[in-house]
Amino acid sequence: MKKNSQVLRWKLIFPLLLLFNTAFSQDVYKFTEGLLLKNVHKYGREALYTDLLAYQLFTNTLKPPTADAVFGTNSSGEEMKWLKVSVDTAGRFRTRSFNGGYIYLTYNSDQEKTTLLNIKGNSAVFVNGVLHAGDPYSSGWMYVPVNLKKGLNEFYVRGQNLTASLIFSNKPILLNTEDATLPSIVNGDNNNGLKGAVVVINSTQKELTNYSLKSNLEGKEMISVLAPIPAMSTRKVIFQFNGEAVSGKSKVDCKLYLINGNKTIDENKVIVEIADPSSEKYMNTFVSSIDGSLQYYAVAPKTEANQPGSALFFSVHGAGVEAIGQARAYQSKDWGNLVAPTNRRPRGFNWEDWGRLDALEVLQLAKDKFKPNPQRIYLTGHSMGGHGTWFLGATYPDNWAGIAPCAGYPTLKGYGSADGLIPDSSSSAIGNILLSASNQSDVFKLKNNYKSFGVYILHGDADRTVSVNYARSMKKTLAEFHQDFSYYEYPNGSHWYGNESVDWNPLFEYFKWHNKPVDTAVNTLDFTTASPGISASYYWATIHQQTIPLQYSRIQFKRDKNAGRITGSTQNVRLLKISLKDFSAGKSIAITLDSLNEVNYITKTATDEIYLQKESNSWQIATAVNLSEKGPHRYGTFKDGFNKKMVFVYSTVGTKEENDWSVNKARFDAETWYYRGNGAVDIIADKVYSLPTYKDRNVVIYGNENTNSAWKLLLKDCPVQVSRNTVKVGGNTLTGDDLAAYFVWPIKNTESNTVSVIAGSGLKGMNAALANQYFAGGSGFPDYMVYRLAMLKSGIDEVKVAGYFDYNWKIK
């Protein structure tokens, strides 16, 4: 979205007036001078990354920067120098041609102390060697508690066009409401026990436990017990408030009090909107099953009271746009409700990964709330949401009666936005293994999934942000096979030419003409997926396991219910399930797939389902799927552990340096998860973790077998093992203290839980594993990968092992 139109939409979008804590303004040090090093790192939407400065830092070869000092040479043999840089009149470091750079800042402290670091415009920062998350979109509310030592303190800031300051407060524990997540008080709804979320900043060396938050709204008080807030961390915490006493207002103050025992530690307030659902858009909040944090979705209600069986329009927003702004761009319709999920943040995950999961959560909430006609659910979105429309439409094709991408790009392989492109291919075999974990993003490979619904493409022909050529390429692609799509280029239309950019009447008229067929009427299937762990089912067939993991799988089936026959072909399918609920009990069924042997089955009930397994070039009836094997319930990849209310488990039984790395890495991941995913996560020590206490929750574990006491509980049987100076992967053994590993493993005796492992064979290897671009939307990570610290300077040649477990979680 163009900057000027984006700013305008922000003013219309989010008038919650979240308040800045005045304690922050007591003593602020603003950085004004520094040293710039250009083109020294490359991070993006893939497992690979290079960072020459981090490599020198981790190998203790980084020299203290001075103006015009030579850092080293680049790949072309040219000298790389530290250059003086100063802020402009707005207090911002601005430089041209500043891709892949660092700014070096220093601060001399008269004593050891803690402070809050606030940088806008950076992707990360090393503070005295400890890595912390950044604020790449200059949101402004990212406050990172850091320890300053007496004397020189060094900051290597990764980013561009940034401001940086240190905030010294006399309050070590603060209640910050700048980044609140709040619902609307909706007239006529039950407003007792509404949920909001605000940030608690803990600048102490101790975890905050037994804290609570008291809300007071128009004299109605509620007290909420808070989750623990780790030492030197921030956490977004959930609180309840009672909006029953509100009447005749458009906004109301809700006072908040952070309490420990009988003592008030801090207080603040938020401003909550009141909405009339007959005429105004509003927000609902919910607790996400991804991590237990509070999220919201926005609603543009239909013009008259909702009636079950109305249509549902599901609208996904563009980069930098809030869900409530997306909803406010539409006039309410008389034939359906519009619901806009958040993607977890205005930029979030590009509607992939956890953005995709957020969309699925909100879609189910919308179905439960409005009870729409399942044959009249439509998907649309703008810009990044246009990509979300292409992606969610192709990934879950039996959800929609029609889709309408507006000003969208189809795949992150062609339009990368802030995190860059997903590479299309690699020159090495191991590189292609890594990239195959991103196959789900390539909708061109999933194009046949668009067959089952109508597609309306809307794009301005003068769009300079997302070129109209993306729309034209999809038009050309659909024209090869699709029987029902419509295409319109808005004359002289820029990226945003007013609300008609999304609220385009012909688009909704097109939706009116389209209904999704009832399941019983669908007798022909054509479905492709890159991973059953992301998308497995299409009407009455489900792909449970692939022959080659994360390569594209396709089924093309036809059924004749009267004759009792199912025929078709499969590609890259090992195990599938076919629902026979549309056949009557006692019906003889003949199934022939891939022109192989005929499988015969007689239905026992009207709800039978059958599993078919392909072995030795024949299809055979299989027993019910074994949940210990891979399947849609648990398929990998490495990123899978960051789900199902995961808990971060750091080490305490290693050396001091190893344990410090572990807790700092867990904190860095939690900071990034909060920033990118509006998330909150429990961070615990290994000695606290137990399987019964954290039942039904995923785990992310940091360290190795020697440093983390939870390792044997979770990873005893895993074919990937990491210990000091050794990494074993199946029958292969690698040695050295510089090996880093990412891998995933099922938690034993659970139906669907996994542990994601971030490990190193020594401090060098642990530091190599610090980067967390796995939070970049669409970035691909396989089930396991092992690489050396030298990858940071040499690239893919230092990736030693990467791949996928087979269907039985074994390495072939």
Image (cartoon, helix red, strand yellow):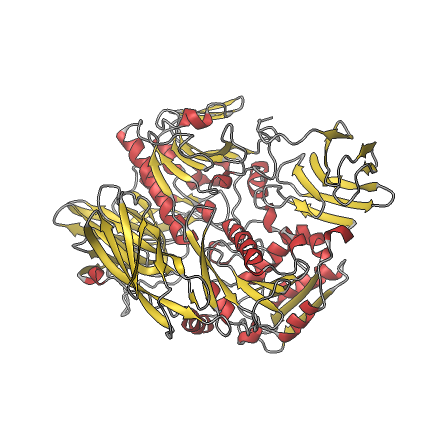
Say if 341 sits above or below 766 in the image. Answer: below
Task: Say which of 288 and 369 sits in front.
Answer: 369
For this rendering, which residue is in front, 776 or 603? 603
Residue occupying the point 67% across, 34% down: 547
User: Which residue appears at 63% of the width and 56% of the height?
Assistant: 393
**Farthest residue in the right direction?**
563
Total labels: the figure holds 0
Image position of 107 with respect to 792: above or below = below
Q: In which quarter of the image is the C terminus?
A: top right
Residue 78 in view: no
Image coordinates for residue 520, horizontal then vertical, percent:
76, 51
Residue 805 coordinates in the image, percent (x, y): 57, 31
* 323 to the left or right of 477: left
Instruction: Tell me where residue 292 appears, x and y as whole percent.
Output: 42, 47
Q: Can residue 151 be seen in this view?
A: yes
The quarter of the picture where residue 508 lies is bottom right
Name the residue rendered at 44%, 42% in the picture.
645
Q: In which quarter of the image is residue 611?
A: top right
Q: Is residue 571 left or right of residue 493?
A: right
Residue 794, percent from left and from top:
45, 39
From the viewer's perspective, tell me whether residue 420 is left or right of residue 386.
Answer: left
Residue lying furthest left: 110
Which of the pair 460/249 is nearer the observer?
A: 249
